[in-house]
Amino acid sequence: MAASLTNQLVVALSSRALFDFEAENKVFEDGDDSAYMALQLSRLDEIANPGCAFPLVKKLLALNTPEEQRVEVVIVSRNDPVSGLRIFRSAEHHELNLTRGVFTRGSPAYRYLKPLGAKLFLSAHEHDVRAALEAGFPAARVFAQSMTEADKHPNEIRIAFDGDAVLFSDEAERVFKKDGLPAFTAHERSKALQPLPPGPFKPLLDAIHKLQQETAQNSPIRIRTALVTARSAPAHERAIRTLMQWNISIDEAMFLGGLEKGPFLKEFEPDFFFDDQTGHCESVRITRPLKLMTGKGFRRSIASKPAIKGARKKPQ
């Protein structure tokens, strides 16, 4: 009988998200993939240093027990298979129980998310994140040069989400863009009892909430979630009622009414923050060097920019 990842939280991530391959990536950007592959081969026995997603991956894997596998982390990478040897060796050295990986040697790797049943794809490559989002998968860009203090909250996984266009659809946001704040407020007040449609990260929140409930009593790692949104009263009511309708509880909610999110996230200290506006993520990076990523579509102004290095395929 074939193995199955059903009922597990499957997180797929690129090698650059897990390990610090920024120096190697510069070789690729300055030359070609053959030079990059040769460098990785020459460093086969050199253990890679942790990357920006490493602390979160370590804590996610700590939710597993010998009796129950709750989280599966899979490397889904544009790297070549030989570079995969170094990745798995480095994972073993760092005592990360990673056994599955897909290596595509420059080809888009996101197409393997569906057979994996991935609930989240993390990558340092913006084009891959956009493609995964367009294909209907929760995906986020990792700012590969930002790190948190791995031991800041060693027994807690802290995850913060934006609301509109992330957990919720962009229905209300479109009203704001088209007609302004008064129309948005009136729209949300009139629809307070009508749940918002789900956004691209709602499946991830479902999986995290389920995991949170399963591990509440018998795990050394706790999960803490926060909603961090530009909404304010009275528009807050529809957001809260939507979560109630979904039977999902959030530990903290911040209705900021347009205030800068960075200082509030500095206090919450998330392992990851999902937001669809890069500017919000940048404000947090300035406030505190934490691991960040952007969600849903990168806003049109960003999505319209050409991919890095044009058509060149970056290793992941």
Image: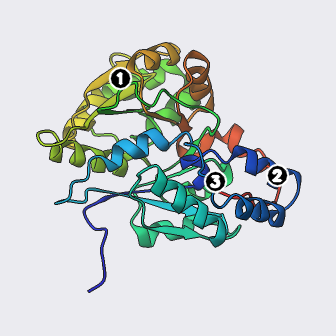
When the figure is inspected, residue 167 is found, relative to residue 14, above or below; the finding is above
Check whether the beta carbons of the residues at disc 2 and disc 1 lie within 8 A of each other: no
Circle number at residue 109 = none
Is the residue 170 above or below the residue 306 in the image? above
Q: Nearer the viewer, residue 221 or 252?
A: 221
Q: Quadrant of the C terminus?
A: bottom right
> Which structural element holds mark 2?
helix
Q: Amino acid at mark 3?
A: Glu
- At 55% from the left and 42% from the top, the residue drawn is 50
State the CA–CA distance, disc 2 to disc 1.
49 Å
Camera-near label (3 vs 1) is 3
Around disc 3, counting alpha carbons within 10 Å, would you say few (fewer than 14), some (14 to 19), or many (20 or more)? few
Type of the residue with mark 1 = Ala
Three-letter residue code for mark 2? Val
Residue that label 2 marks: 27
Nearer to me, 18 or 299:
18
Q: Which badge, 3 or 1, comes first in the chain's sequence?
A: 3
Q: Is residue 300 visible?
A: yes
Tag 3 residue: 46
Indicate the position of residue 45 as horizontal and vertical percent values. Answer: 63, 59
Q: Is residue 110 above or below residue 24?
A: below
The residue under label 1 is: 235
